[in-house]
Amino acid sequence: MQHHRLGRSAIYVSKICMGTMTFGSQADEAMAHRVLDQSLEAGINFFDTAENYPVPPKEEWAGTCEEIVGRWMKTKDRDAIIMATKVSGPSHTWFKSPKRAGMTTLDRHNITKAVEDSLRRLQTDYIDLYQTHWPDHGTPYEETMETLDELVRAGKVRILGCSNETSWGLMKSIQASERLGAARYQTIQNNFSMNNRRFEDELAQVCRQEGVSLIPYSPLAGGVLSGKYNNGARPDGARFSNYLNIGGRQAAMAKRFVNDKTLASTERFMAIAAEAGMAPVTLATAWSKQHDFVASTIVGVTHTDQLAEIFAAADMLLSAEVMKAINSVSKEIMYPMG
């Protein structure tokens, strides 16, 4: 398994990161632990969770994922694992955090409470990568970064990252850290896939110039790039099948991933994968890894049966011809997720 540095930090991680947001909802604890075990055996040392997981967000579920991961990690060599988790930011989009009665912000009170709770649930005395989950453009970045810096100095957190942040927000945070002489964001975790290449418009340049690594989530576009939603299919138990049934914010978000343009581009990408002799999942994972601004690609599964096609991409380098074919589809069907 290839490894890559996170930003300008001293931490090197596997090029594939195992996400855990379905643990406790779509995957029970026994299955979750089997997924984690097989990932570790395959050479993955990087794992991502969050205080509000699993999804979809429910008050009775919030924190369950960290507890499941914590019980697993307690049986392993802690030094061999790079564990990432997140503090919930404001609930101002499709997402509404069930933590702290939904009154989540990135101020001192919320961050301090969140990190202590995460450490307890994870059964560890430090978090390798602590990330802000959704930006807070209402709280001064100085307050957020100063509070996070205190966690680093206290040894509770090794390095910092953000998630779902904008170019403006990332630069504001870096500037605030520089003014304060405080720890800065080393990573950004945003949506990035063959169906959503918005990151390349502006944020990729910020990452290159400022030494920030992208750890993209949803490289399979929420499973769409596997082809399981083709021809109007709504697979039982699949995330977007469930979201469409829930309605409201979740349904609106699902329709961003599953629509006429995303399904059309997916069919084209699946043809490219077939021509190259690989599974669509393998193609999508390998493509995500193959960018200079990406440190590690976050994948997620609900069953161990889904791991083989992901692991097949671990050391894969797509040919120039395959990359050109993918780029051609992206030019013809621009921004399928909007």
Image: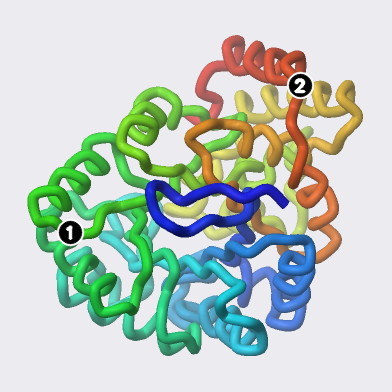
State the SS at label 2: loop
Residue at 47% from the left image edge and 85% from the top image edge: 124
Q: Is residue 136 visible?
A: yes
Image spot of residue 246 (x, y percent) = 54, 59
In the image, taking residue 96 as reference, residue 46 lies left or right, namely right
Residue at 73% from the left image edge and 65% from the top image edge: 39
Image spot of residue 116 (x, y percent) = 32, 84
* 10 Å crowding of disc 1: few (<14), some (14-19), many (20+): some
Q: Between residue 293 and residue 95, name the one nearer to us.
A: 293
Image quadrant in which you'd find residue 233: top right
Q: Between residue 329 and residue 142, name the one nearer to us.
A: 142
Is residue 71 placed above or below 55 in the rendered structure? below
Image spot of residue 239 (x, y percent) = 64, 56
Q: Amino acid at mark 1?
A: Ala
Q: Amino acid at mark 2?
A: Ser
Is residue 112 placed above or below 261 in the rendered structure? below
Residue at 32% from the left image edge and 45% from the top image edge: 165
* Residue placed under numbered mark 2 in the picture: 319
- As drawn, the residue found furthest toward the front would be 10
Residue depth check, mark 1 versus mark 2: number of the one nearer the observer: 1
The disc placed on residue 182 is 1
